[in-house]
């Protein structure tokens, strides 16, 4: 069993593509991040961490990180591989890890063994998949592609969204918005004024991912987010994909119910952990 860390994103994608695409649903976040690194490297300001563990020519685990974000884990064939990743990262300032339930739990336990640092589970999420949009009641308004004149509003909304989900990366909002505008992958529901937003784009020929979804408090409970996601999901299907993915917070029964009405169905659960430095405990 051996860990390989690469700096060349093209070489890394060539090495890991087949493994990731075998479980495209479970790996949709990793694939999306890697596609962004390949085609929009300006999105990230620091060198990413790209590693995989291999034995007898077969990949057992993949880990990627785009600082300042958490480590992302693939589906793992041998949980012992996570010990090698933890050991490789032990000198880094790793804020947390995100992955499938068993994989994330095994990593934080390995991390604690290697570093002595405690950990805390921050959020329990569920990945959903849609293949057909179900009819839903639609409020007034329409979906439109965000444009350059929406930039200031989008930056404010991205910062508000990050604050709500506990992501202290508001300084990245301008870079994210500029990339999204360049990709043409951020949409607004407009009812006289913009009232909700959703990001969405194809990250392979047949698969799309929707994220983030945000409605300011003043416009909530008016079905704007439901309409925004439903119409955007149909738009992505019409563009040629056969599946759309999105994550929900299991602590938010309202959003889970909304997306179920649209046609999203559960695929798997996904946990995020924060890794707490010993000196702060």
Image: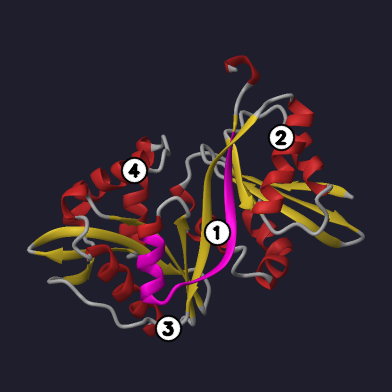
Residue 272 in the image: above or below residue 280: below
Mark 1 or mark 2, earlier in chain? 1
Taking the spot 47% from the left edge, 40% from the top edge, the residue there is 45
Mark 3 or mark 2, earlier in chain? 2
Image quadrant where one finds the C terminus = top right
State the image coordinates of residue 189 (x, y, percent, origin top left).
20, 65
Q: In front: mark 4 or mark 1? A: 1
Residue under label 3: 132
State the image coordinates of residue 90 (x, y, percent, origin top left).
72, 30
Q: Which residues are magenta?
A: 255-274
Taking the spot 53% from the left edge, 63% from the top edge, the residue there is 127
Residue 82 in the image: above or below residue 27: above
Q: Nearer the viewer, residue 165 or 81?
A: 165
Mark 2 or mark 4, earlier in chain? 2
Q: Nearer the viewer, residue 157 or 121?
A: 121
Q: Residues within 10 Å of mark 2 (few under 14, many from 20)?
A: some
Image side of residue 43 versus residue 72, left or right: left
Q: Residues within 10 Å of mark 1 (few under 14, many from 20)?
A: many
Mark 3 or mark 4, earlier in chain? 3
Q: In front: mark 3 or mark 4? A: 3
Residue under label 4: 173
Taking the spot 33% from the left edge, 60% from the top edge, the residue there is 182
Residue under label 1: 29
Mark 4 or mark 1, earlier in chain? 1
Can residue 129 be seen by looking at this rendering? yes
Inter-mark Cα distance, 3 to 2: 41 Å
Inter-mark Cα distance, 2 to 4: 27 Å
Q: Residues within 10 Å of mark 4 (few under 14, many from 20)?
A: some
Can residue 188 be seen by looking at this rendering? no
Question: Are circles 3 and 4 on residues that touch, CB within 8 Å?
Answer: no
Residue under label 2: 89
């Amino acid at each position: 069993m051996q860990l390989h860390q690469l700096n060349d994103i093209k070489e890394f994608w060539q090495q890991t593509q087949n493994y990731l695409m075998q479980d495209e649903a479970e790996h949709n976040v990793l694939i999306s991040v890697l596609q962004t690194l390949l085609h929009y490297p300006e999105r990230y300001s620091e060198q990413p961490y790209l590693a995989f563990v291999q034995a007898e020519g077969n990949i057992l685990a993949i880990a990627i990180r785009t600082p300042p974000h958490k480590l992302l884990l693939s589906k793992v064939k041998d949980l012992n591989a996570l010990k090698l990743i933890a050991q490789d990262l032990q000198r880094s300032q790793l804020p947390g890890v995100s992955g499938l339930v068993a994989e994330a739990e095994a990593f934080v336990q390995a991390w604690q063994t290697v570093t002595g640092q405690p950990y805390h589970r921050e959020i329990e999420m569920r990945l959903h998949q849609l293949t057909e949009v179900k009819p839903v009641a639609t409020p007034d308004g329409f979906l439109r592609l965000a444009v350059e004149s929406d930039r200031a509003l989008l930056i404010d909304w991205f910062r508000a969204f990050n604050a709500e989900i506990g992501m202290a990366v508001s300084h990245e909002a301008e870079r994210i918005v500029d990339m999204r505008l360049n990709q043409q992958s951020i949409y607004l529901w407009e009812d006289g004024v913009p009232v909700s937003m959703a990001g969405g784009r194809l990250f392979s020929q047949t698969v799309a991912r929707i994220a983030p979804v945000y409605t300011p408090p003043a416009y909530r409970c008016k079905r704007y987010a439901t309409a925004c996601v439903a119409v955007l999901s149909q738009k992505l299907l019409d563009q040629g994909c056969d599946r759309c993915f999105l994550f929900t917070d299991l602590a938010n029964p309202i959003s889970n119910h909304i997306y179920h009405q649209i046609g999203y169905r559960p695929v798997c659960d996904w946990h995020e952990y924060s890794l707490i430095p010993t000196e702060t405990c």
